[in-house]
Amino acid sequence: MNTLKKIGLTALAGSLVATSVFAGEMSVTGSAGITFAGQDKTTVGNGFTMSDEITFSGGGEMDNGWTVAVSMQLDNNASGEAESATAVSNMDNRSITIGMGDAGTISFVGHGGDSALGAVDDVMPHADGNETWDTIGDATGGTASFNSISGNAVENMISYNNSSVVDGLSFTASLSPSNGGTNVESTMSYAVAYTGVDGLTVGYAMDENSEAGALQTDFTTMYAKYAYGPVTVGYQVSEEDSATAADNDEFTAYGISYAVSDDLTISYNESSYDAATIATDQEQTAIAVSYTMGSMAVTATSVSMDNAGGSTNAIDDVQGYELNLSFAF
């Protein structure tokens, strides 16, 4: 996104780790988008939706060379409700990040953050930037479809990242402690990624979710992507090992994208979800194209999903599409 403007701030009084913060700056960025989507098994709903958000980012430098960055986002649909007259604007993603030079960064996330695994649960190349499973809805009256395996959603999280210890290697760890209000007592997540070979990215991540009653569910993912000129290919496999031995699922995805030019990209993706308790796998394919014109982007995606939720009923074989026009400032 292009910075709208930068506003000088007066020096902040106070201290953090016994150091003062020098005068910082604030940037304001935002985006707005119009989407038209639909599929052949839906009988209700308006195909048009609109999204918009504004992000305020501020930062400063302490006298020991460390940095502090704050980010807060206003999102028209931050409540997670379907867009309607009752949806209200409020704070969505918000975080504070402390940069410690070669020692890495520490972030405190109040809402909207991803665990170390959640940030890489589907990193396959895709022209419109969406995750391979996140374009098509379920059929009206049909079976609920599976998403990818991404661990539990987390809030009030602390995370640590370091990419300075070994050239090309990055490490991330995150912790969401018990909030006392749900059965998930805590979520600990780790991720490593290696980019030391030109064009190649490989990674591994895991979530450990400790639940009430000494139960634990583990989520893992492994992936590899390789870019050669305008072509990028990727493969990823994720697993969920439930506290119940019979309920272990697997998600597999692969994709290829081709940059026709600096502005035009096309992609093809496939994914499958194998639920241990269901005999039939859910399978999905997607073809997407994107075209950018400065701060404006146009994307189109066509999706086919077979056996949604592992069901073999005809209603659970769904064809869908999504057209999107977005602006960034």
Image (tube, grey):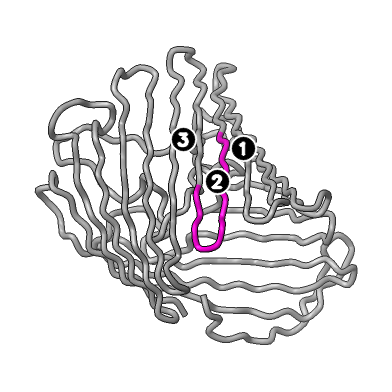
In the displayed structure, does residue 324 sit left or right of residue 328? left
**Res. 149 mark:** 3
Would you say the magenta stretch is mainly helix, strand or loop?
Answer: strand
User: Which of the 4 image quadrants contains residue 328?
Assistant: bottom left
Asked if residue 108 is among those painted magenta in the image, a careful observer would answer no
Label 3 CA crowd tier, 10 Å (few <14, some 14–19, many 20+): many
Q: Position of residue 284 (x, y in %)?
A: 31, 40
Q: Which residue is mark 1?
A: 205
Residue beneath the point at 75% across and 56% down: 105
Direction front: furthest residue: 229
Q: CA distance from mark 2 to mark 1?
A: 8 Å
Marked residue nearer the N-terminal end (3 or 2): 2
Residue beneath the point at 37% across and 51% down: 268
Amino acid tagged 3: Ile
Q: Position of residue 255 (x, y in %)?
A: 43, 47
Q: CA distance from mark 1 to mark 3?
A: 12 Å
Amino acid tagged 1: Ala
- Tag 3, which secondary structure? loop
Marked residue nearer the N-terminal end (2 or 1): 2
Marked residue nearer the N-terminal end (1 or 3): 3
Q: CA distance from mark 3 to mark 2?
A: 10 Å
Q: Is residue 24 above or below residue 142?
A: below
Q: Which residue is mark 2?
A: 120
Q: Position of residue 170 (x, y in %)?
A: 72, 49
* Cβ–Cβ under 8 Å for marks 3 and 2: no
In the displayed structure, does residue 232 sit left or right of residue 9? left
* Cβ–Cβ under 8 Å for marks 2 and 1: yes
In the displayed structure, does residue 3 sit left or right of residue 276? right
Give the residues in magenta. Answer: 221-233
Amino acid tagged 2: Val
